[in-house]
Amino acid sequence: SSFGFSVCAASRSRQLSSLAAPSGLATAMPCECQWGLSSLILGIVVILAAGVFTFFPAFLGLFDYPWYIALCWLWFGIGVTFTTIGVVYECMGCQRAGRWHNAKAKEAEEDAPTPYIMINA
């Protein structure tokens, strides 16, 4: 199973690299992944989903099985883990500079665009 995944991932990366610019700029680009923000949002969504699924046995008496409640707690724990990782990652400033990072936005604010002048004909 893992061999099939690695072969699939390798062929997928070859497909993506063939679509990249011919000068090899794809390998020189910085990672633009938003790990902290993505983990934070994913964790909150998982916590909310675990709360929705916990509503059924807690208030309606449906699905009142020990294994179901244990799964709700498991998903709640997974959500808390993702949220904690996201908060720590964002607070520690672990995000690399890239297209979406605040350092680029601050540089762009310094240079004001040239205003257009309307010419009456």
Image: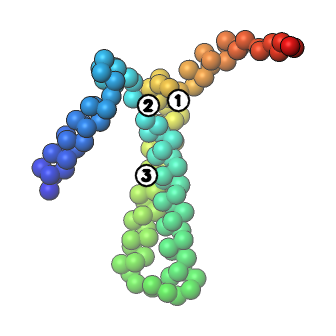
Q: Amino acid at mark 2?
A: Glu
Check contact, mark 1 vs mark 2: CB within 8 A: yes
Q: Position of residue 101 (x, y in %)?
A: 53, 27
Q: Quadrant of the N terminus?
A: bottom left
In this picture, residue 88 sits left or right of residue 67: right
**Which of the two marks, 3 or 2, is nearer to us in this view?**
2
Residue that carries the numbered disc 1 in the rendered image: 100
Q: Amino acid at mark 1?
A: Trp
From mark 1 to mark 2, how far is it between C-alphas? Answer: 7 Å
Q: Residues within 10 Å of mark 3 (few under 14, many from 20)?
A: some
| Dot 1: element | loop
Q: Earlier in the sequence, mark 3 or mark 2?
A: 2
Query: Which residue is most to the right?
Result: 120
- At x 47%, y 37%, the residue is 34
In this picture, residue 18 sits left or right of residue 82: left
Q: How many badges with numbers are in the image?
A: 3
Q: Residues within 10 Å of mark 1 (few under 14, many from 20)?
A: few
Q: Amino acid at mark 3?
A: Thr
Residue 88 showing in the rendered view: no
Q: Nearer the viewer, residue 115 or 117?
A: 117
